[in-house]
Amino acid sequence: MAWRIAGSYVASCSCNLICPCPVDGTPTGPDGECKGFLVFSVKEGTLSDTDLSGVNFALFNHFPSNLTAGNWKIGIVVDEGASDEQAQALERILKGEEGGPFGELSNFYGEYLGMDRDSVTFSDGDRPSASVGSSSDVTFAPLEGPDGSPTTVKGAMFGFAPEFMIGRGPGKSDRFGLSYEPVYGEAADFEFASEMEEGTPTGRI
């Protein structure tokens, strides 16, 4: 079925500044692994006739090595205010069952940790922040250039947007057995769909 979601996201992970995962480098978190979570705020979205607008969800990850080595662990939390139909639609998208960029990513999944329901909040702006229940939170602080503008990464092999801000992502996270102290952070607007132009960065995520 055709689907599309668009909005904003903020992320954190255990890698040192700057996280090498977008360029398929070896993670720089403890033990050479990357543990992280991202919160997505869907401003517009549908899966077939299911409206996904206004839903927040979180994606938790454990990358044991560089991304293309695979064997990822992935867990999902959908905001408790979403309907069961909306939660199930997002789960199908994120597990890759509905194709598109997450369908490609699912080739790297090693273990699906399941889907939880909890409060998932997102606050937009120059320093976006997010939380997932009492288990995880992040407040993004961008690195800045000489003119004060945020430092960005563009055209990465893996990315949730064609260009995204990078910086620090202090907070905490302990969900799905993936406990870590956040260090790196990133944020951007996103748009994913079941049909995307070939070669777009979000087509590979």
Image (tube, rainbow, N blue to C red):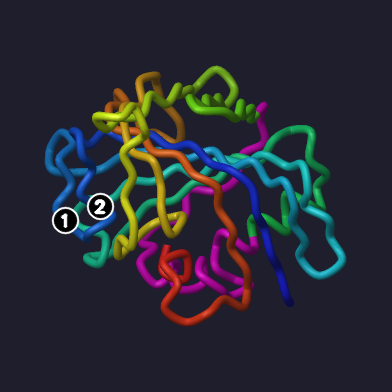
Q: Residue furthest bottom?
A: 198
Q: Residue furthest front?
A: 147
Residue 21's mark?
Answer: 2
Label 2, secondary structure: give it: helix
- Is 19 within the magenta? no
What residue is disc 1 on?
Answer: 25
- Kind of residue indicated by mark 2: Cys
Vertical placement of residue 184 versus 111, above or below: above
Residue 171, image quadrant? top left
Give the class, few, some or many, for how many residues have Cα within 10 Å of label 1's Cα (few <14, many ≥20).
few
Vertical placement of residue 124 versus 74, above or below: above
* Side (left or right) of 173 relative to 48: left
Q: Which residues are magenta?
A: 92-119
* Side (left or right) of 123 relative to 20: right
- What's the distance in space between the residues labelled 2 and 1, CA to CA? 5 Å
Label 1, secondary structure: give it: loop
Residue 7, how many percent across, how many down? 64, 47
Residue 85, how many percent across, how many down? 82, 53
Residue 50, image quadrant? bottom right
The answer to the question of whether label 2 and label 1 lie on touching residues, with beta carbons closer than 8 A, is: yes
Residue at 57%, 59% (x, y): give it. Answer: 94
Residue at 39%, 46% (x, y): give it. Answer: 61
- Kind of residue indicated by mark 1: Gly
Residue 27, how many percent across, how many down? 18, 46
**Which quadrant of the rendered structure holds the N terminus?**
bottom right
Give the class, few, some or many, for how many residues have Cα within 10 Å of label 2's Cα (few <14, many ≥20).
many
Residue 188's mark?
Answer: none
Residue at 28%, 55% (x, y): give it. Answer: 22
Q: Name the one closer to the observer, 25 or 148.
A: 148
**Which quadrant of the rendered structure holds the C terminus?**
bottom left
